[in-house]
């Protein structure tokens, strides 16, 4: 495991090697350059990066934390997917869900997971773009700011000159991290909405177990499947943020949601310290993986799987077994072919219910 950007930032802050204001101004300037290049139709931003249109709005008048040694994510620039409520009185940005129906929605509170990040002194840079109401898999359906573009589009060298999609619905979060507009980003995942765009953009998408963290303040799509999730540049950074959500002294990320699992304090403590170990580990660390068992479902060898993907898949499986002594086996999930049908039925029912409620609330 290689130490991530969050660990290095944390170390630089604590040793006074890097001023917090410089970090904030650097990332803010990258976001502004990205927005400017997209709005003016430029093929590259002033930083030489394909514009992504990954931020819907940018927070203003930041009150920077006085100290950056209180938590591992203190002073870490983060994007927030625009279906998480953010206190408009504090951040002065709306929560639109990428929909004109909520264009002027200004929540008076932060979502539980956002409040936890604020308590840990993370830098909230702004709200990231997405598919409208998180209903999509390409981040091409945002009605407020338009589609998200994959920073790997490289339109100068592509023969057809067309942009590449970032995936969705959390495409803005994935593209922002991949383009270096923020160190990490909050996302949501119902049926792949964080993991798919992360894969498209070459970053890490992590969906925690349902019930591990609170959904309070996450505008619902499918209540039974929605989970606050993360997009980071590496696994260690995801572990850093998850450790904050499970921190014994910062319980905000597990409040105000009846579906949160009632985990014993001892188990939360163990999870917290395990995540801290992952977040701060080095590439030559002795993390115990000998007891890790990894099952590869034969049903996942689906029709249409490219030979290139299968080759990499087999290579990684061998690497985990040989280099990390993990137990890697083929398994069967006989009911897996029905998963998409079950998912579709649950989605149809709960989306209809939630969208009807939204219509009533907004008087449309």
Image (cartoon, helix red, strand yellow):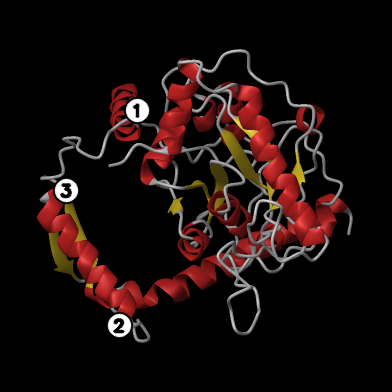
Q: State which tag comes first along the sequence, 1 or 3.
A: 1
In this rendering, the label closer to the viewer, 1 or 2 = 2
Q: Please indicate whether residue 19 sits to the left or right of residue 88 in the image.
A: left
Q: Considering the numbered disc 2 on the image, is that residue within a helix, a strand or a loop?
A: helix
Which type of secondary structure does the marked residue at label 3 adopt?
A: loop
Quadrant housing residue 328: bottom left
Q: Residue furthest right?
A: 363
| Near-viewer residue (316 or 38) | 38
SS at circle 1: helix
Residue matched to label 1:
272
* Residue drawn at the location 52% of the way across and 72% of the way down: 344
Quarter the N terminus occupies = top left
Q: CA distance from mark 2 to mark 3?
A: 27 Å
Which residue is drawn at the image coordinates 66% and 24% (left, top)?
Answer: 21
- Above or below, 326 against 141 in this view is above
- The numbered mark at residue 292 is 3
Q: Is residue 244 left or right of residue 91?
A: left
| Residue occupying image coordinates x 34% and y 28% | 276
- Of the numbered discs 2 and 3, the one sitting upstream in the chain is 3
Q: Is residue 314 above or below residue 79?
A: below
Question: Toward the viewer: 220 or 64?
Answer: 64
Q: In the rendered structure, are the residues bearing label 1 and label 2 in contact, judged by CB atoms less than 8 Å apart?
A: no
Give the quarter of the image for residue 72. top left
Of pointers 1 and 2, the one earlier in the residue sequence: 1
Residue occupying the point 34% across, 86% down: 303
Residue 235, percent from left and from top? 37, 45
The picture places residue 340, in percent across and down from the top left corner, at 44, 74
Disc ID at residue 307:
2
Q: Residue 160 sits in which quadrant?
A: bottom right
The CA distance from mark 1 to mark 2 is: 39 Å
Q: Can you say which quadrant of the picture contains the C terminus?
A: bottom right
Question: Dot 2: within a 10 Å radius of its alpha carbon, few (fewer than 14), some, or many (20 or more) residues?
Answer: few
């Amino acid at each position: 495991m290689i130490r991530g950007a969050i660990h290095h930032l944390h170390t630089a802050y604590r040793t006074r090697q890097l001023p917090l204001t410089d970090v904030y101004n650097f990332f803010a300037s990258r976001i502004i350059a990205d927005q400017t290049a997209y709005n003016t139709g430029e093929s590259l931003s002033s930083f030489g990066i394909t514009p992504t249109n990954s931020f819907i709005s940018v927070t203003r008048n930041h009150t920077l934390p006085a100290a950056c040694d209180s938590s591992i994510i203190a002073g870490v620039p983060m994007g927030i997917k625009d279906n998480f409520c953010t206190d408009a009185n504090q951040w002065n940005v709306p929560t639109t869900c990428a929909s004109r129906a909520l264009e002027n929605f200004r929540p008076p509170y932060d979502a539980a997971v956002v409040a936890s990040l604020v308590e840990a002194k993370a830098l909230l840079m702004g709200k990231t773009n997405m598919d409208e109401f998180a209903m999509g898999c390409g981040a091409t359906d945002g009605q407020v700011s338009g589609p998200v573009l994959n920073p790997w589009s490289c339109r100068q060298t592509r023969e057809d000159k067309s942009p590449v999609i970032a995936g969705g619905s959390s495409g803005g979060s994935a593209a922002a991290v991949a383009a270096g507009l923020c160190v990490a980003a909050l996302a949501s995942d119902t049926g792949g909405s964080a993991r798919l765009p992360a894969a498209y953009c070459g970053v890490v998408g992590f969906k925690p177990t349902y019930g591990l963290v609170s959904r309070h303040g996450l505008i619902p799509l499918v209540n039974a499947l929605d989970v606050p999730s993360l997009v980071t540049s590496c696994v260690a950074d995801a572990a850093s943020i998850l450790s904050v959500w499970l921190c014994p002294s910062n319980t905000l990320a597990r409040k105000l949601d009846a579906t949160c699992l009632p985990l014993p304090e001892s188990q939360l403590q163990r999870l917290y310290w395990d995540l801290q170990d992952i977040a701060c580990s080095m590439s030559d660390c002795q993390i115990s993986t000998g007891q890790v068992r990894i099952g590869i479902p034969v049903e996942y060898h689906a029709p249409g799987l490219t030979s290139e993907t299968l080759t990499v898949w087999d290579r990684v499986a061998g690497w985990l077994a040989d280099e990390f002594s993990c137990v890697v086996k083929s398994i069967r999930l006989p009911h897996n072919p029905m998963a998409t049908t079950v998912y579709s039925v649950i989605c149809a029912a709960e989306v209809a219910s939630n969208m009807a409620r939204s219509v009533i609330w907004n008087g449309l």
